[in-house]
Image (cartoon, rainbow, N blue to C red):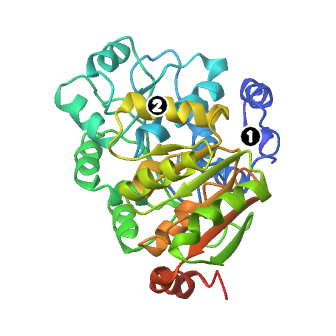
Amino acid sequence: MTYKEQLTNNMQETLQNAGYTDPTPIQAQSLEGLLAGRDMIGIAQTGTGKTAAFGVPIIERVWSENKKTQALILCPTRELALQTTEVLRKLSAHKHLRVVSIYGGQNVKVQISALRTGAQIVVGTPGRVKDLLERNVLKFANVRHLVLDEADEMLDFGFLPDIRTIVATVTGEHQTLLFSATFNKEIAKVAAQFLHDPLRVEVGVRDEPVDTVRQMCIKTEEGTKLNTVRYLLRETAPRLALIFCNTRRRVKALTKKLGDAGVSAACLHGDLSQNQRDGIMRSFRLGNTAVLVATDVAARGIDVEKIDLVINYDVPDKPEYYVHRIGRTGRAGHDGLACTLVSPDDRSRLRDIRLRYHVLAN
């Protein structure tokens, strides 16, 4: 049976209207099991279509007449929660489901009001979900679908205690899905604790850069990195470019240097308010700002298909950050370019990445 043949006619029409043509590998490999109610571990990079992979079968199984929360999706960042909410609203248009996102940084009264009118699907960050549970605003007695999205990033953020508290409140029979770009001992422990006899779908090589990203290593001096960035932007003419630095201070300094050199760039870091972050991301997503400079933490959850170029101005401190960074390009089957600038001070970190991933050869 084909992917479409497993879906209702209304869902098939919605997918067509939303621009979904052929299913991605993770969608095709997981649909039958998820429609049957299986738990699942999905190992895949972002940009591989995993939101639709879990969203389509969940929407097919949610009862539209019941206004109580039937599905809960936990995400590590506000940005990812909003993106997931947008996708699920498009995919559930034919059923007129209410999908509500809850996260820190927005007035909690606004979110409480949205929830009180009923929401079959709730998408949220663990901290705010836990807060609203403790306020007795959220109730999960009717939850039959629980998704831990980007589980590795949620663990990096220290959300495991909140996740345990939340999962403990989902006491009815339910399906649990865990998605992660990496699969290490910590993720394995979480899966063993929360999932039962899970279906396992692994797309691509585990914890490896996606093959749609061309990777380059450019040797340079610290003092010439700025000129190298300007050269790359000029020669590759990307629709959107994302540049990574290891610290907030470096992000701020590079953004100013680019501006002084005539390159319009915005920066994303932890010192920004939520409103500032929203405005910057809106401008970047629309293409009004073509160059964004960010730290690893600030860039978590960014899912923008038009990013053609990623530049590692600093070699990341942790090898796994390399995969997360360059995975911001080469999405949805499109080609991308990732360039890593290597000064003498960066060589030890580069060596760790080479040993782990066998990339960026001399």
Q: Which mark is residue 325?
A: none
Q: Quadrant of residue 226?
A: bottom right
Residue 32 lies, in percent from the top left, at 66, 49
User: Within 10 angstroms of label 1, few (less than 14), some, or many (20 or more) residues?
Assistant: some
Q: Quadrant of residue 337?
A: bottom right
Residue at coordinates 63% horizontally, 58% vertically from top-left?
A: 310
The residue positioned farthest toward the left in the image shown: 134
Residue at coordinates 82% horizontally, 40% vertically from top-left?
A: 21
Residue 139 lies, in percent from the top left, at 28, 27
Q: Quadrant of residue 359?
A: bottom right
Which of pointers 2 and 1 indicates the residue nearer the eye? Answer: 2
Quarter of the image with the C terminus is: bottom right
* Of pointers 2 and 1, the one earlier in the residue sequence: 1
Question: Is 153 or 10 nearer to us in this picture?
Answer: 153
Q: Which amino acid type corresponds to the residue marked 2 in the rendered image? A: Asp
**Secondary structure type for disc 2:** helix
Marks 2 and 1: CB-CB under 8 Å? no
Q: Which amino acid type corresponds to the residue marked 1 in the rendered image? A: Gln
Asked if residue 139 can be seen in this view, the reply is yes
- Depicted 294 relative to depicted 351: above or below: above
The residue positioned farthest toward the front in the image shown: 260
Residue 186 lies, in percent from the top left, at 35, 69
For disc 1, the marked residue is 6
For disc 2, the marked residue is 278
Residue at coordinates 61% horizontally, 49% vertically from top-left?
A: 50
The number of callouts visible is: 2
Please state if 11 lies on the left or on the right of 88 as rendered. right
- Depicted 249 relative to depicted 168: above or below: below
Residue 11 lies, in percent from the top left, at 71, 28
**Secondary structure type for disc 1:** helix
Question: Is 110 or 44 nearer to us in this picture?
Answer: 110
